[in-house]
Amino acid sequence: MGPLTKRFGQALSAFLILFTPTLGAQTPNYQQNIDATERWLTSSASIRSDGAILYTSTDIKPYFSNLAAMGLVENSTYHPQVEAWMRWYLGHINYPIDKWGLACTIYDFKVSGSTETPTNDADSTDSYAATFLSLAWAYWKTGDPNARAYIQTLKYPLDCIGGVIVQTKQPNGLTWAKPDYQIQYLMDNCEVYRGLRDLANIFDQVFHDANGRDFYNAHATDVFNGIQSQLWDSGNNNYLTSVGALPTNWATWYPDSTAQLFPAVFGILAPNDPRAQQLYDTFNRHWPNWTQLGFNDAFPWVVVSAAAALRGDPNSVNRYINKIQSTYVSTGFPWTWYCLEAGWFIRVNRFMLGETNTLISSQHLGRHRRGCDVASECEHNDEESD
């Protein structure tokens, strides 16, 4: 057994020990939740005939739609909807140039009847691009021949979308939210890290392009190092919500508290990393009733349950899922349920059924803390192992 295989085995064993359930919350019907949520997410109330995934009946926010589509990739029945969304996204990117001077960004859209009108703005450029790249990698990983054939046609647009991130990355390794909003957010940069690693994997495994792989891995490592050097607040043992922000206030749900979970969810930290454990435990001390939606936000924040699942806290996950069942699933998914929450909810339920790749690929376990989750890169940097 080589050192890389041994490290992976140790990390996986530790992860599975963490995830072993104990007596606690009533076990939900995960498959029933998946089926109901998939039906809602693929209904005419959520997806337009042209493939656009809606935020509300009058809004398309591609960032939310990317994360929604991530929930559908593991069910081949809904691959046509995933691909239709990806085609919609690529058909609406700004090319050759947008209002910021960039290519391959995308704006939010307003919907009125059959008309979709760009707002000429977006909440960010970095996260929109990053989550689309992660969606492309997730779609490829399904192994479906049609999915793979489609992704194989996307080298230029994926490279162009990767360029959106690279062009807004600053010397400290972190990206601006967008060129006219020059804030370097923790949450955005965690998504950016994941998107760049996923794009590196695409260049490696789909296009067999070592130069592209190394290019995007290098940028991902820059982001990783930027998060750990610019956003980690060693005096308070937590992350800043953005570069230059005030110290984190754990009494504030968003962004202060929720942002602390993003490094583990998006692979900056391995699930069994002591820093990830400490942040999750601190989060629970300050928000002990999060599983019952006991926080001052109208939205359900399903991503928090993803962090709990990765941490190996199935009792909290089950209590949360039961609450979502009674609040949203059994009542027909009323507002404030929307597409992003649906995507995360499907993934968390699949994870609880043992489909752990729906939240994070097993090849990434144990490699995040040093920013290495592509096998070839890890082998080349084996001396840097923890």
Image (tube, rainbow, N blue to C red):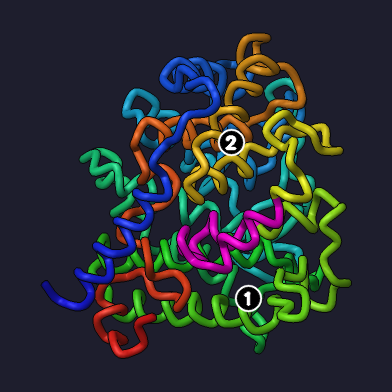
Q: Which residue, given by chain and number where applicable, does mark 1 sit on?
A: 227
Residue 120 rendering spot, x and y as whole percentages: 78, 52
Q: Residues within 10 Å of mark 2 (few under 14, many from 20)?
A: many
Q: Which residue, given by chain and number where applicable, does mark 2 sit on?
A: 316
* Residue at far left of view: 1
**Which amino acid, mark 1?**
Ile
Residue 264 image-quadrant placement: bottom right
Figure check: 337 above or below 234: above
Figure check: 16 above or below 68: below
Q: Which residues are magenta?
A: 261-283
C-alpha distance separating marks 2 and 1: 28 Å
* Prevailing SS of the magenta stretch: helix
Q: Residues within 10 Å of mark 1 (few under 14, many from 20)?
A: many
> Does the magenta portion include 67?
no
330 with respect to 241 (left or right): left
Q: Secondary structure at mark 1?
A: helix
Residue 293 image-quadrant placement: top right
Residue in the picture at 42% in, 33% down: 352
> Does the magenta portion include 278?
yes
Residue in the picture at 49% in, 75% down: 220
**Which amino acid, mark 2?**
Ser
